Image (cartoon, rainbow, N blue to C red):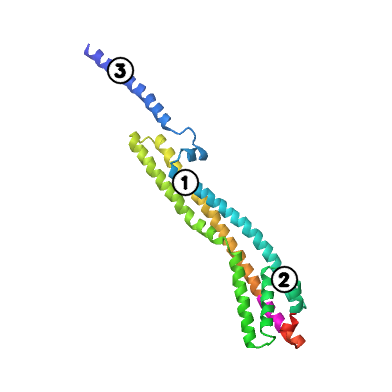
Amino acid sequence: MTGSRSTFLLAAAALATLAVQPAFAAGAEALLPSNLSPWGMFQNADIVVKTVMVGLACASLVTWTVWLAKTIELRRETSRAHQRLEMLESDTSLRQVARDSAEARDAVAQLIHTAVRETELSHGIFDDGFKERIALRLERVEGAMARRIARGTGIVATIGSTSPFIGLFGTVWGIMNAFIGIAETKTTNLAVVAPGIAEALLATALGLVAAIPAVMIYNALVRSITGYRALLGDASAQVMLLISRDHSRRGMPLARAAE
């Protein structure tokens, strides 16, 4: 009789265990997000993590916008600089290049205009002081044009250097919330914990997506700007050569030659 009773109790305990397991699984499944895609994880994320993700997406958009705008601008300005250089290297005079670029506002045209202006102010006196003044004017124009063409690249550098840390902040915040959720649900079931951690790691992934192209784009823009500045340096040298050649050929005051 006692043996039958023990067997009955063991069977009842086994049935109770089998009944509890599906109930626990159903409860765990109820805690799981219904959508584990990137968009679903974004929707289920904390407001702070969402803000980080949106900020990183906007930063990435700014990066690509700056890349497109600066690429078009650099190609246009580089093409114009090459055309002006060909003109300066031809058998021409200061008067002729000043006329050809009278209405232009590109960088090399600005170099020509400032050189003509200095010849007028110096009354055609060609001496060492005149050369220094011309060189100083050309250097100032080069710097101004280089700063103008580099406008907007600083923000790309900032995005490239800070995006990983911003994404890491979102991840740390999301993992904190995941552990808080573990404490509240009193379960360490990986199926329940993993979605919250995945949502947090999505912020780091977006940070890298924003940072890696930004660093590559910044380096490419810096190389292009360096090449453009080299073209301006060549143009300044050609302007100096043209002034000296024009003075030697004509044997007349440079201010008259520039009229």
Q: Residue 8's spot in the image, x, y percent? A: 28, 15
> Taking the image as drawn, is residue 245 in sight?
no
Q: Which mark is residue 12?
A: 3
On the picture, is 122 further left or further right than 163?
right
Disc 3 vs disc 2: which is toward the camera? Answer: 2
Residue holding disc 2: 84
Could you tell me if the residues under marks 3 and 1 are in contact, i.e. CB atoms within 8 Å? no
Q: Nearer the viewer, residue 247 or 230?
A: 247
**Above or below: residue 185 compared with residue 56:** above
Q: SS for tag 2? A: helix
Q: SS for tag 1? A: helix
Q: SS for tag 3? A: helix
Tell me, yes or no, whether the highlighted magenta stretch contains residue 239: yes
**Above or below: residue 236 compared with residue 38:** below
Say what amino acid the circle numbered 3 marks.
Ala
> Taking the image as drawn, is residue 8 in sight?
yes
**Above or below: residue 19 compared with residue 75:** above
Q: CA distance from mark 3 to mark 2?
A: 96 Å
Q: Residue 120's spot in the image, x, y percent? A: 69, 82
Q: Earlier in the sequence, mark 3 or mark 1?
A: 3
Q: Residue furthest top?
A: 1
Say what amino acid the circle numbered 2 marks.
Arg
Q: Earlier in the sequence, mark 3 or mark 2?
A: 3
Residue holding disc 1: 51
The part of the chain drawn in magenta is: 236-245
Q: Residue 65's image quarter? A: bottom right
